[in-house]
Image (cartoon, rainbow, N blue to C red):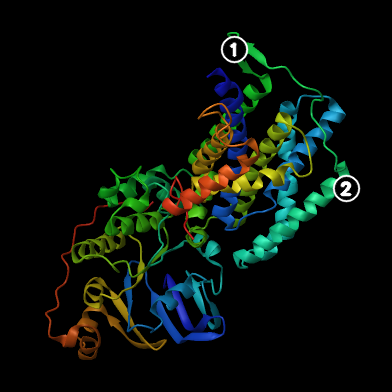
Amino acid sequence: MIDFINFHLIPGLVLGSIYALGAIGVTLTFGILRFANFAHGEIMTLGAYLTLTMMWLTGWHPLILLPVTMVILSLIVIGMDQAFFKPFRNSPAVTVVIASFGLMLMIRSVTQFSWGAQLQAFVPGIQRPNVFFDALRISPKHILIVISAMVLMLVVHWVLAHTRIGKAMRAMSDSPELARLTGINTELVIKATWILGACMAAAAGVFLAYDSHVSTMMGFQILLPTFAAAIVGGIGRPYGAMAGGLLIGVTEELSSYAWLGDGPLLEPGYKAGVSFAIMIGVLIWRPSGLFRGRVF
Amino acid sequence: MAILELENIHGGYGQTEILHDISMRVEPGEIVVIIGPNGAGKSTAMKSVFGLLNLTSGRILLDDVDITNTPPEKVVRQGVCYVPQTGNIFPNLSVHENLEMGAYVRQDDFSGRLDEIYELFPPLVEKRNLPAGTLSGGQRQMVAMGKALMLDPKILLLDEPSAGLSPKYRGEIFKVVRDINEAGTPILMVEQNAKQALGIADRAYILVDGKNRLDDTGKNLLANKEVAEMFLGGGKTEVKKPAVRKARGTPKT
């Protein structure tokens, strides 16, 4: 039982928090700009590398540097929007998706060129987990990641539910045409969307790197489960993205627990398939997702 | 002086011209109705005011200021509010948030105006925290109009506010339109239900094939034989004016 918590439930929550943060950005972009942003994974990667660089320069803890990373990454992402996505504002979604795919490859190449393709780590070596009650093993970084993720999700909730710009974001997600007729400054809302998405992507990238390592493929490797989380939660639904991320992260980790007999139910190598199984199930039985998002 | 004036406008979407020389005006305090057969360019004429199509000639004046081909987000700031026929609310935002969005371009405190809107549409008070998309058709129209009125516009444009509503709600919406007007907002409205619309109209324009066909007071048009044949079921049915409701005394802020 304690193994279940130590080796499956807690890592599941950590992974789920990371997926959830990434999925918030994916789902906001989808809801407001109406396209699936393939570059989102590389934005997370970029966040991790920015933090790594600042750690080299300052020697500070990654979570202390996270707010700085968020600011820098937001500026970079707004620049990317102006250069790569703004010219396509009135283009069909497919065109924009392809543009995001190209942007993804460009960011990855720049990252590899600047920081090298080899694995790096925030903190070299293995960290010992704290042991509670002689059995419960939780490493401090996991506690930090999960708590920070929860705080960030509350911030997202507060922005969307209680601020003028957050409400305008939801309004534009509902109907861009009506938002324009209402006098909402749609370009400003788009900027806010990128900023919120970039901040959450920065957190996802930094937490993922903090939990394992920094690599130029890290963002892309979690991009597909992140998309799955956004779809499971309901496209365009930030709360759905949070729930979908946690659901997929936890289920992925629980799938390799020894539910029947001694061996893992599913070999850990198949973990990645779990998110797609959930996604396909949701698409068949509840195509609008858990939180009734858009259906295509 | 007219609040809104369309002077010989020509235009349409892209290259296709839909409006061929349309002129109309709305005076302060008036309800002006546009009626006409399908495809006559009624909604298009209204959208032209809101900068939603490309005008090739003619001009549109708001309070004597030229607003021809001004984009919608700027027209709103000039004090024109437009309620489209469909998709006129944010379904996932609560009723209250919809009204707040209506006031998006206002920088001042609009809580007083919110109270007035709730006074004008009492059924919305208890639904204020529900997603607007869960409301009935008539109440959604109320949200849409309330949202538009948050800016206390110089003129309100309504595109078929009674479309798709049951007769009971239709009557209610026409009453609401009257109430809004009596509280001081001039209204330009496109309507399919010609009889009811002419009943509350001060003046009306009849468009056919993107051109002005007739314009007169609502009363005269209701009595007009040609109009009766065109829109009112051969003029056999008796014309009834909806009961005038007392103004709620909503002060103009």
Residue in the foreground of this view, choosing between B73 and A192: A192
Q: Name the residue located 27 percent from the left edge and 79 percent from the top edge.
A: B217
x and y percent of residue A16 in the render? Answer: 58, 35
Q: Which residue is mark 1?
A: A135
**Rendering coords of residue B111 (x, y %):** 40, 42
Q: Can see residue B107?
A: no
Residues B97 and B218: in front is: B97
Residue A284 point in image, percent of width and height: 45, 54
Three-letter residue code for mark 2: Phe
Disc 1: host chain? A
Q: Is residue A105 above or below residue B204?
A: above
Left or right side of A35 for B30: left
For numbered disc 2, what is the local secondary structure?
helix
| Residue at position x 51%, y 81% in the image | B12
Indicate the position of residue B240 as horizontal and vertical percent values. 14, 74
- Can you tell which mark lies on residue A113? 2
Q: Quadrant of the N terminus of chain B?
A: bottom left
